Image (cartoon, rainbow, N blue to C red):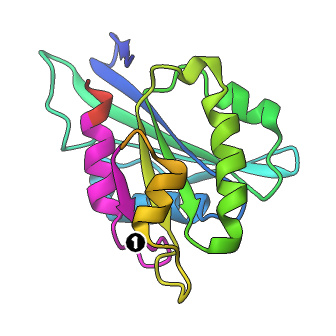
Amino acid sequence: MPAFDYAASEVLFRFIVTGPGDAGKATVLRQLHAGVESSQRGELCVRPIGDDKIVRFDFTPVDIIQKDKYRPRAEFLTLSGRSADRAHWARLFAAVDAVLFVADSRPEKMEGNRAFLEEVAAQPSLAEVPVVFLYNKRDVPAALAVAEMDRLLNPAGAPAFQTTATTGEGLAHALAALCALALT
């Protein structure tokens, strides 16, 4: 549920980019940041937290229709790193409006994708939170078929997008879907 900042006349959405280590979460965030008009976004901030880093930025999403006198404002954040502390993730998952789950398309990474997804699904604060899947690293030669990734990770049929984070391919459509889901 979005929060209201009455003083700033803003409705605030919080989006978490999550997934296993080395799936491309921070790269996704950097590409999303680069794809938003500079006048509509804040700075990309990187802050150390334990052995990992929080990467975040906020922006005014043009895909979300303004409600009454409040303009929308969205915050994206992730923990980058291969061994992110689960306690840090649990704190970030509090008060989330939607989740962007980044899955690595390489076959040898599927077990890690599934294990991390199970951990995310076990978070009580995420029981009713919409999820958008990014099947990332589609440019690798042995990428799993999308139908197989859907079968293994997304049997409920949540929105899923094929992406290549290093080039930004597929991210604009995923961002639009994520913003739309946050309103439902």
Residue 136 among magenta residues: no
Task: State the residue at coordinates (44%, 51%).
Answer: 133
> Which image quarter holds the N terminus?
top left
The spot of residue 25 in percent (x, y) is 59, 58
Tell me if I can see residue 48 in this picture.
Answer: yes
Residue drawn at point x = 14 percent, y = 32 percent: 65
Judge from the rendering whether residue 149 lies leftward or rightward of residue 78; answer left or right: left
Q: How far across and how far down the image is residue 136, in percent? A: 50, 67
Write the residue at 71% across / 28% down.
90
Residue 76 drawn above or below residue 52: above
* Quadrant of the rendered image containing residue 182: top left
Q: Position of residue 14 (x, y in %)?
A: 46, 31
The stretch in magenta equals 158-180
Compared to residue 55, the image places residue 118 above or below, namely above
For disc 1, the neighbor class at 10 Å (few under 14, some 14 to 19, many from 20) is some
Residue 53 placement, left or right of 34: right
- Name the quadrant containing residue 106: bottom right
| Residue 54 position (above or below residue 25) | above
Which quadrant does the C terminus fall into?
top left
Identified at 44% across, 44% down, the residue is 155
Q: Is residue 167 magenta?
A: yes
> Does residue 54 appear in this view?
no
Is 163 left, or right, of 52 in this rendering?
A: left
State the residue in front, 77 or 106: 106
- Residue highlighted by disc 1: 168
Q: Amino acid at mark 1?
A: Gly
The residue at the far top in this view is 6
Q: Nearer the viewer, residue 139 or 175?
A: 139
31 to 67, vertically: above or below: below
